[in-house]
Image: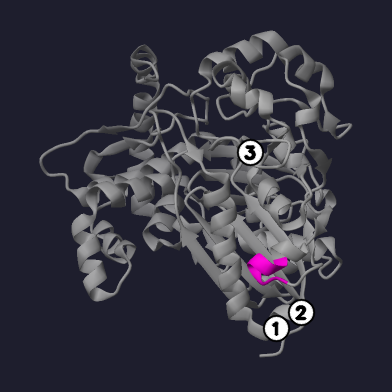
Amino acid sequence: MSTGPLLLGLDIGTQGVKGVIVQTDGLVIARASLERGPAHPHPGWAEMDAELDWWGAALQVLRELVSTAGDDIINLKAVGICALVPCLCPLDYNGRPLRPAILYSDNRALKELAWVNEQAGLSLNAEAVVPKLVWIQRNEPQIFEKTGAVASCQGYVVYRLTDQLFMDYDCAAIMGSVFDPVTKSWRAEILERLGLPLEMWPELSPATGIAGKITLQAAALTGLPQGIPVIAGTGDTYPTIVGCGAVEIGDAMVSYGTTGLLTIANQPLVESSGGPHFSASDGGAAVTWGANVLSAGRLISWYVEQFASNEQIVADRLGQSVFHLLEKECSLIPAGSQGLIVLPHWLGRRTPTPDANLRGSILGLTPSHTSAHLYRAIMEAFAFNVRQSFNNFRPSIKRLVATAGGARSKVWRQIVSDVLNMTLSYHPESSGSLGIAFLAGYAVGLVTEFTDIKYAWLQSPQEVVPIPENVRVYDALFPSYCEFDEALVKPYANLGSG
């Protein structure tokens, strides 16, 4: 097959890596993926090996994409990388990782979090990187002394491709209030107050800035053509928003990823293509955060690992996905899971109010409940957690778009539509990897209008309409979810994080 100019997008997530090669008209000519997940060496900890889990996994996916593209890879014009954020990967002065990277969902640094907030007058939550760097300084001083730079996930992979280390504005903005979005520079006075050297922090760049080009060594390892421009890239949220076409005012995205998200576009995204893009709730930036559910797709993976061994055996024999069988079982369970309620805080809660001490809960069990009830209740938990914030933004939402891996589930899409009582749009080609490929094309001038991805790349989305009977069930159950969520704050705080 002969193609025109090609764009490559790679999305390095918490549970897997996905990549696409796409034409500038949106036609995907190659796709590849690889599953793997984080390590949890202690309760509340979450880590990844940057060399194996980030760069090594990216290499495998890149090689598969190149193999599928064949001779057409010569038409590749730009590469974009997005990834899980925020995370902390300390590098030595030669650019080598010094220890496993600490992820956004890691809660080890709660004491340091309190100290940083008091010392610098901040109000960070447990997701922030800065308290985790302070934790390394206090608990692993030999690592801290050798640290020449701190890298984000996509920043490290871009570095391995180009030998250039950058951090984009969005990643910088969620490191922990050490980035000034007005001057687009690091806040030296806060870093000095916290005893964190300014020299550790990478050079800053727009997400669509050209970080460098594929080096000779990276070309030999990946099969990519030498000299192809690579953009600085960004975290996975903004490319996922772009990659599902939620690019105009009033477009909202609900992402069924490892972490679940709700975001709302306040302005046409083309107006802030380089970033920073996000605000907490004031609506001043291009995108507003609506909800952040740390354990969304992660809970589905947990369920499969712990409870779906029989379904996995049957699925293997039939040559089907285990999720196909679980979907069939779950579809037989009525809305509301017959009063079974799950609180999805396996890794703490981020919204509607942050609480790192909260844990997951399964409430209302009776002898009549089955594993299929639990599977459905986990899906409903995600929807309920999103709803806790959703109503605050409902008046400004004109269109709601579902995306990420979990959105492939028809049952889960219907649940979210019913719980939120809003029509949901879904296109099976939407993804963060598609979005970052689009942004790479935008950076080199091969695509110019963000609306192209909404109306041309992702034509004829599927529509999910709320079922009135289910809406009534969820309206009745939602207050109980909220009451349980509030009632368990104190006992979990007393239980502690150990």
Residue topped by disc 3: 289
Mark 3 crowd level (few <14, some 14–19, many ≥20, 10 Å Cα): many
User: In the drawing, what numbered circle is on residue 175?
Assistant: none
Which numbered disc, 3 or 1, marks the residue closer to the eye?
1
Q: Which of marks 2 and 3 is nearer the N terminus?
A: 2
Residue at coordinates 41% horizontally, 36% vertically from top-left? 40
- Quadrant where the N terminus is found in the figure: bottom right
Q: Name the outermost residue toward the bottom.
A: 1
Q: Where is residue 340 in the image (x, y as percent from the top left)?
A: 25, 39
> Would you say 363 lies left or right of 400 here?
left
User: In the drawing, what numbered circle is on residue 75?
Assistant: 2
Residue at coordinates 72% horizontally, 85% vertically from top-left? 3
- Quadrant where the C terminus is found in the figure: top left
The magenta segment: 219-224
- Quick check: marks 2 and 3 in contact, CB under 8 Å? no
Residue topped by disc 1: 72
Q: What residue type is labelled 3?
A: Trp
Q: Name the outermost residue toward the right.
A: 183
Q: Position of residue 161 (x, y in %)?
A: 72, 57
- Where residue 99 sits, quadrant-wise, is top right
Q: How far apart are marks 2 and 1 (CA)?
A: 6 Å
Is any atom of residue 447 visible in this view?
yes
Q: Which of marks 3 and 1 is nearer the N terminus?
A: 1
Q: What residue type is labelled 1?
A: Asp
Q: Is mark 1 on a helix, strand or loop?
A: helix
Residue at coordinates 33% horizontally, 30% vertically from top-left? 480
Q: What residue type is labelled 2?
A: Asn
Mark 2 crowd level (few <14, some 14–19, many ≥20, 10 Å Cα): some
